[in-house]
Image: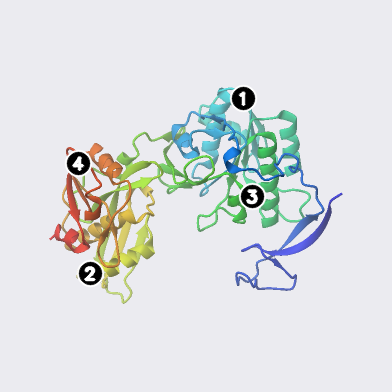
Amino acid sequence: MARHKKVYRCSSCGSTLPQWMGKCPQCSQWNTLVEDIVEEETPLRTRDARQTRPMVLSEITPLETFRRGCAIAELDRVLGGGVVQGSLVLIGGDPGIGKSTLMLQMAGHLASAGMKVLYVSGEESAFQLKMRADRLNLDSSGILVYPEVMLEKIRDAIDEFSPELVILDSIQSVFSSQIDAPPGSVSQIRHSAGILMEIAKGKGVTVFVVGHVTKDGWIAGPKMLEHMVDTVLYFEGDDSGVFRIVRAVKNRFGTSGEIGVFEMKSDGLQEVKDPSSIFIHGLGGDVAGSAVMATFEGSRAFVVEVQALVSKTSFSMPRRIAMGSDVSRLAVLLAVMEKRAGVYLSQSDIVVNIAGGFKVTEPAVDLAIVMAISSSALDRPVSKGTVCIGEIGLGGELRPVNHMESRIREALKLGFTRAVIPASNHESVPRVTGMEIVPLSHVRSALEILS
């Protein structure tokens, strides 16, 4: 029989603390003490199923990973080719962005293909799920709906009906009677994730878990939750817009960083077959303050539009706003422009936006940002049909980026005819018919194009 004892942990970093401490000595956060119930002398249930002796890595026979496509090509791409048997997948995003809609659409397609699906809803009633299924025009005859929040009852239902796919919406609403803590607490989420992992690995059941996010956009709960699961998916995009991006932040069965693009319509999320067309408007050259770049996400290239607005300000502290890119990186680029290229913008408000709600984190966007800012400051548009790709160093030099050929070919497919790239990338890029390559070595040379 397992024994229980109370311990006190920091909800920020998970460290064990004395009961009377108000400040965590590990992460220096105040008022983060939470009560946790831990089990002592609990037998390890999965011990017999694990290999207890060391093995030579080269002699291990890999298991064939069973995948099943869910008839949603963009979601299959993000998952690495389809739904993997026995995997635990965590999906998070802002409220109303479409997490439950996507999960119900996936459940409908897989149930129609003969897969036994159990949809556990802790926040919506069975009637609400039925209304959504009717709105999405789904064949819901093969989906078992179970509106329940107690973890023990959910586990009993899985044992009784033996589903092949379980969708839990959401993990913050589930609680276990063995844990003396409210639903959504650190201890409850940790315990629930452990039980779900045991179900997925022990029974070979594919489990999808919906997670709430904090105001900063991260999945709520301990970071351990993301370490425990096999795949972590994030929904991106403004919930007031129509386009959604699903990004694989972690994937043990495929490439992390893959993205899928969807459009929200009245009948649910629809795939976007040509994502580059939604992130650009024409070939540029129509208005000052706009530049086009080709970014690379996962295994695919996208052409996105970078917009900038430079406006004189009478305030002593000009504003620096970056939407879809790193604001700290923007400050570095402005310092390089002033020091290395003689462009002084210390008395101007600067706003940078990646059009379409896309987020670009790679440094290859540097050149496009600098070109868009300079174009707005000088009120001179970038030449029509020009795509700008390159990282800018602190010395003002243009540094090489990877996958340059794929980026250029994606831009060529959309009608662009001129590519401004770092000179160090020029030799590694084969000649592309229809695309003029302009190799440059310094940011000053790039800005001379606008002069």
Label 1 and label 3: CA atoms lie apart by: 26 Å
| Quadrant assignment for the C terminus | bottom left
Label 3 and label 4: CA atoms lie apart by: 53 Å
Disc 3 designates what residue? Answer: 172
Counting residues from the start of the chain, the first of labels 1 and 3 encountered is 1
Image location (x, y in percent) of residue 177:
78, 49
Q: Residue at x 50, y 55 (%)?
A: 217
Query: Which amino acid, by three-letter code, is at mark 1?
Result: Gly
Image location (x, y in percent) of residue 268:
47, 34
Q: Nearer the viewer, mark 4 or mark 2?
A: 4
Instruction: Mark 2: give few (<14), some (14-19) or many (20+) Cα within 10 Å.
Output: some
242 in relation to 326, above or below? above
Counting residues from the start of the chain, the first of labels 1 and 2 encountered is 1
Counting residues from the start of the chain, the first of labels 1 and 4 encountered is 1
In the rendered image, the residue lying farthest to the left is 451
Label 1 and label 2: CA atoms lie apart by: 64 Å
Q: Residue at x 33, y 74 (%)?
A: 317
Counting residues from the start of the chain, the first of labels 3 and 4 encountered is 3
Query: Which amino acid, by three-letter code, is at mark 3?
Result: Gln
Q: Pick the residue in front: 125 or 419.
A: 419
Disc 1 designates what residue? Answer: 142
219 in relation to 413, above or below? below
Disc 2 designates what residue? Answer: 340
Query: Which amino acid, by three-letter code, is at mark 4?
Result: Arg
Total numbered labels placed on residues in the image: 4
Q: How is the image coloured?
A: rainbow
Is disc 3 placed on a helix, strand or loop?
helix
Label 4 and label 2: CA atoms lie apart by: 31 Å
Disc 4 designates what residue? Answer: 431
Label 2 and label 3: CA atoms lie apart by: 50 Å
